[in-house]
Image (cartoon, rainbow, N blue to C red):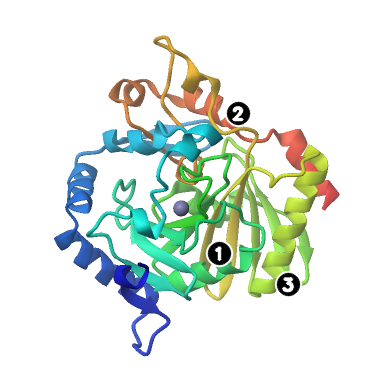
């Protein structure tokens, strides 16, 4: 039952902000949900190092508990055969959440990559997808400001539950791309329209598009045009593969779009010593590459990382065509 899972609802009669309500959720869950207590004990043990690449830097993180997500089987058969871990009826007994606008349940991620890592699951078991939910995504980013940024992983490029609609959130300022997207020397203005701007980022080793604007409806409209343009250039009927990150600061929405070519690099599927267990999602393409295996953590260098980006992200020519088609 959904009602048994709700610790707090937002909005409510209380004057607490959504970040304050989420902090209270963390405090309650970190004292009552054993799996989350273990998850945060493991997070304290992760190893992180910065890798200087050509013109940019990223972090690599060795996080053994992420094997559940990095190694997740996301093919339709495996998905059909498992119990959905985001459906209310399958949540562990001690897991509670914040009911957000009667439509999503904000939950603490029990396998965190970052401190205060949240999963925001739709209350119904409906497939992952951004179309029709852009305004919900922007609205969530606004409600979670100024403390959190929110993410979206497409069903075929990083979502570990492609069958259940969900977003994620984590404290703002931890992902290198957030800093890069705000940096004047990396920003190249490409397009302005109805109070919105579209930019591309330079020297970040991968193709990244940024949409900014103060009006949610205008930002949503430009984002929808971008998806249509991707669909046209890539000759797709299904949702183009994207990871998204959204922050809301100084009254402005900033949507960072990572256009993807494929989900996992070929090295993921190797069965020999050259296998690298990295399954890129929004946090990875945002600049924190997570691997559950120590040997991969030790050997990830600038070349390997650039190779992964080159393989899973759309190439420059295609992205140029997409921007021209807008
Ligand atoms: Zn579900």
Q: Nearer the viewer, mark 3 or mark 1?
A: 1
Left or right of 220 in this view: 126: left
Q: Relative to the observer, which residue lies in front, 292 or 323? A: 292
Reading the chain from its start, which is encountered first: label 2 or label 1?
Answer: 1
Task: Say which residue label 1 marks.
Answer: 137
Quadrant of the rendering where the N terminus is positioned:
bottom left
Q: Residue at x 66, y 63 (%)?
A: 132
Mark 1 Cα within 10 Å, few/some/many (few <14, many 20+)?
Answer: many
In the picture provided, is 145 more to the left or to the right than 294? right
Q: Is residue 289 left or right of residue 65?
A: right
Residue furthest top in the image: 272
Disc 3 designates what residue? 195
Give the answer, above or below, for where 159 lies relative to 54: below
Q: Which residue is mark 2?
A: 310
Percent across and percent down for residue 221 are 73, 65
**Residue 16 to residue 151: above or below:** below
Secondary structure under badge 2?
Answer: helix
User: Is tag 3's residue or tag 1's residue first in the polypeptide sequence?
Assistant: 1
Residue at image point 19% right, 39% down = 45
Q: Earlier in the sequence, mark 2 or mark 3?
A: 3
Tell me the CA gap for discs 3 and 1. Answer: 19 Å
| Residue occupying the point 40% across, 24% down | 300
């Amino acid at each position: 039952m959904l009602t048994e899972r709700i610790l707090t609802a937002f909005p409510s009669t209380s004057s607490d902000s959504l970040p304050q309500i989420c902090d209270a959720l963390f405090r309650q869950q970190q004292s009552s949900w054993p799996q989350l207590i273990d998850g945060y004990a493991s997070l304290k043990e992760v190893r992180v190092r910065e890798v200087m690449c050509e013109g940019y830097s990223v972090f690599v993180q060795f996080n053994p508990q992420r094997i559940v997500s990095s190694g997740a089987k996301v093919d339709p058969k495996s998905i059909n055969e498992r119990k959905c871990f985001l459906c209310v009826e399958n949540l562990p007994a001690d897991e509670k959440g914040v009911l957000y606008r009667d439509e999503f349940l904000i939950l603490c991620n029990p396998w965190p990559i970052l401190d205060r890592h949240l999963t925001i699951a739709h209350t119904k078991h409906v497939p992952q997808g951004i179309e029709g939910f852009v305004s919900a995504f922007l609205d969530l980013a606004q409600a979670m400001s100024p403390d959190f940024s929110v993410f979206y992983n497409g069903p075929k490029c990083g979502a570990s539950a492609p069958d259940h609609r969900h977003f994620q959130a984590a404290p703002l300022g931890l992902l290198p791309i957030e800093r890069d997207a705000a940096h004047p020397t990396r920003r190249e203005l490409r397009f302005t329209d109805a109070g919105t701007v579209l930019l591309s980022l330079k020297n970040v080793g991968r193709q990244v598009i940024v949409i900014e604007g103060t009006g949610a409806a205008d930002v949503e409209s430009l984002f929808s045009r971008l998806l249509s343009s991707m669909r046209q250039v890539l000759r797709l009927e299904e949702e183009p593969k994207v990871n998204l990150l959204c922050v809301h600061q100084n009254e402005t929405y900033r949507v960072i779009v990572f256009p993807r070519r494929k989900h996992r690099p070929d090295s993921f599927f190797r069965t020999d010593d050259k296998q690298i267990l990295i399954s890129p999602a929004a946090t990875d393409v945002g600049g924190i590459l997570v691997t559950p295996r120590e040997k991969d953590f030790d050997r990830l260098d600038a070349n390997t990382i650039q190779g992964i980006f080159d393989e899973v992200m759309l190439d420059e020519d295609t992205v140029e065509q997409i921007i021209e088609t807008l």
